[in-house]
Image (cartoon, rainbow, N blue to C red):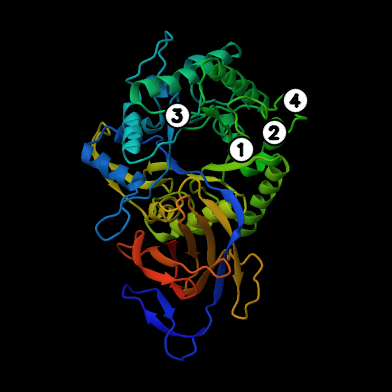
Amino acid sequence: MKGKKILAALGFFSIASVAGGCSQPAPEIRYQIETDQLCQTMAYFSASDAWSMQFIGLWPQEKQNQIADWLFSTENDANGQPKGIGLSLWRFNVGAGSKEQGENSQIASPWMRAECFLNPDGTYDWNKQQGQRNFLKLAKERGVNKFLAFLNSPPIYYTQNGLATNTGRGGTANLKPDCYEKYARFLADVVQGVEQHDGIKFNYICPFNEPDGHWNWVGPKQEGCPATNREVARTVRLLSKEFVDRDMDTQILVNESSDYRCMFRTHETDWQRGYQIQAFFCPDSVDTYLGDTPNVPRLMLGHSYWTNTPLSDLRNIRLQLRDTLDKYNVDFWQTETCIMGNDEEIGGGGGFDRTMKTALYVARIIHHDIVYAGAKSWQWWRAIGGDYKDGLIRECTTDNNFLDGRVEDSKLMWALGNYSRFIRPGAIRLSVSAFDQTDALIPDGDTDQQGLMCSAYKNVDGTYVMVVINYANEEKEFSIHKGKVGNTQWQIYRTSDKEGENLLPVGTVKSGKIVQIPARSIITLQGK
């Protein structure tokens, strides 16, 4: 390559431009975006309102607006820096009524209890869940037009133990045998009621959340309900019929699996809760087959908890999942994750982390879910949390009634923004080939789990996006080539531990020129 290196005015990245007769060394790695090798079509990036928005949605308006800007805005400030991470879908937790029960709910923390629209006499109170509904509207005002409703438990009036938590009942649904139809009617009523009263349409609904999770069998510290595949299928069929009868087009999603391994085999459970892809989408599974059920897309939802370490599992479990999904022609969304106790590389889930340590760890998960599992959507667990690694934003309540406080953003939030802000719904992921300094193809060269990880996309507006993670403790360099001869001017946005580097624009580079990415940082390149 001919040229000389020009240092960028903003510090850490540099490019090589063609000038003079000096020989420019080849970069460590050359990425080529294969514009004719199309992978999955991307849908949404998201997070949920559980459980903090029930309170924070009642805080002073200026604080609500700041949070909403961080989460949903796709605008830039005067310097071209994104104001927020541009989530394109919002998850709404439909409560089961544990909040109304108070301490009798057996859920210790008031933050983890949830209101229910349904009253004991079968009527509805559409003033319930007001804080969460306020954030539905704030999301919509900032351009979000897709919403997903999910439930951890049926309403307490329908459960076998009268609670929204399972209290050691075992692994079957905590739903009275004569309440399946009532539950389906409740779900349809909620979808229609929220649209009527708030102007928000739930495009998707998940009637169960982690029904295979063994934590659900013994009774957790939050709303939850186990279920077998047969119980899930029965509920989904009844809900489908209810939607058809009411001429509703809301999509019913399964299964919000607690662990990828439950989706294609058994894991800490038995056959009644495992092999879920086969159970719901193989016609031979007569009792549970949902492939021809109206309003049910050929789509599986799963959570990436417990599958991120060791690094061999991070890759191999996702390859096994993708193999089974492809066999039965099923799409996949990753719809919930946060940091757990086995994520020992970053110290487990305890203690909120504002730094790139958690941000990079999660970015590596996002990359593997998209590239190896073929996820079309990627969704974080809680938008706002406390002193734990489960929130994009940290809240600290300063009011005894939880109605005021302060919030703080994190590098984790902005790292997700390297994907969510730029990869918009309908974008097509493109294959990326990697070559070394001798121009030899590097097998799996788009993914060095301890170094550079790269993925590329083309949005429906014709813009190209490339996200590069540098997990290493030293600066790396690379060059980009689009197609065989494509030439593109790329704007670079960077997130790092450096103060203010939250999707910060740090200059431009042309295809074929050298880019230097700082240690422990993430950059997004956007170009035509």
Quarter holding the C terminus is bottom left
Residue at (41, 71) in percent of width and height: 509
Query: Residue 242, percent across and down?
Result: 55, 17
| Label 2 sits on residue | 281
How many angstroms separate mark 1 from mark 3 (CA)?
18 Å
Give the mark nearer the N terminus: 2 vs 3: 3
Q: Amino acid at mark 2?
A: Phe
Q: Amino acid at mark 3?
A: Phe
| Label 1 sits on residue | 300
Give the mark nearer the N terminus: 3 vs 4: 3
| Label 4 sits on residue | 286
Residue contact between numbered discs 2 and 1, judged by CB atoms under 8 Å: yes
Task: Give the quarter of the image for residue 95.
Answer: top left
* Mark 1 secondary-structure assignment: strand
Q: Residue furthest top?
A: 121
CA neighbours of label 1 inside 10 A, class few (<14), some (14 to 19), many (20+): many
How many angstroms separate mark 1 from mark 4 (CA)?
18 Å
Q: Amino acid at mark 4?
A: Val
Which circle, 3 or 4, is nearer the viewer?
3
| Label 3 sits on residue | 202
Does 116 appear above or below 3? above
How many angstroms separate mark 2 from mark 3 (CA)?
24 Å
Task: Give the quarter of the image for residue 526.
Answer: bottom left
| Residue 267 visible in image | no
Does 265 appear above or below 506? above
CA neighbours of label 2 inside 10 A, class few (<14), some (14 to 19), many (20+): many
How many angstroms separate mark 4 from mark 2 (CA)?
10 Å
